[in-house]
Image (cartoon, rainbow, N blue to C red):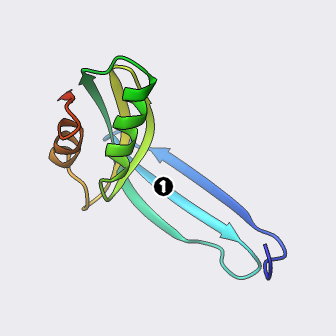
Amino acid sequence: MNGIPSTRVEFARVASSNGLRRSAIAAKDGRLTRIGMCMSEHIELKIGGMHCDGCVRRVTALLKKVDGVLVEEVVVGGAKVDLTSGTAKLADLVQAVESGGFSVRA
């Protein structure tokens, strides 16, 4: 990229015994060394009505639209996500997925 001689991005996640995770993202371009730190809660959803890769792509897109959600994995029948503390709630995830015609159990 023009104007940036080199870039390195690091991502670290530490899980604690209470189910919360601390995530940190650091970028190194000669000046910026830390972008931010956040607490997140790991959630696994059981999702009904998924039958194919198209369903996986649709559910992934629906979850990514929710502010404060980091989508880890979506497979037929379920999803693993992290909720950033203080923003997204479980109800937001359920509403997003159900708006696509799928059913959800946490």
* Image-based side of 46 in relation to 54, left or right: left
Q: Quadrant of the C terminus?
A: top left
Q: Position of residue 16 (x, y in %)?
A: 40, 43
Figure check: 74 above or below 94: above
* Image-based side of 78 in relation to 87, left or right: right
Q: Position of residue 72 (x, y in %)?
A: 46, 39
When asked about the image quadrant of residue 80, the answer is: top left
Give SS at disc 1. strand
Q: Residue at x 35, y 17 (%)?
A: 51
* Image-based side of 19 in relation to 37, left or right: left
Q: Nearer the viewer, residue 52 or 21?
A: 52
When asked about the image quadrant of residue 76, the answer is: top left
Name, please, the residue furthest toward the front: 54
Badge 1 density bin: few <14, some 14–19, many ≥20, Cα 10 Å = some
Figure check: 53 above or below 32: above
Q: Residue at x 31, y 21 (%)?
A: 50
Figure check: 28 above or below 94: below
Q: Is residue 46 at least partly visible in the picture? A: yes
Q: Quadrant of the N terminus?
A: bottom right
Name, please, the residue furthest toward the right: 5
Q: Position of residue 77 (x, y in %)?
A: 33, 20
Name, please, the residue furthest toward the top: 51
Judging by the rendered image, the residue that carries numbered circle 1 is 23
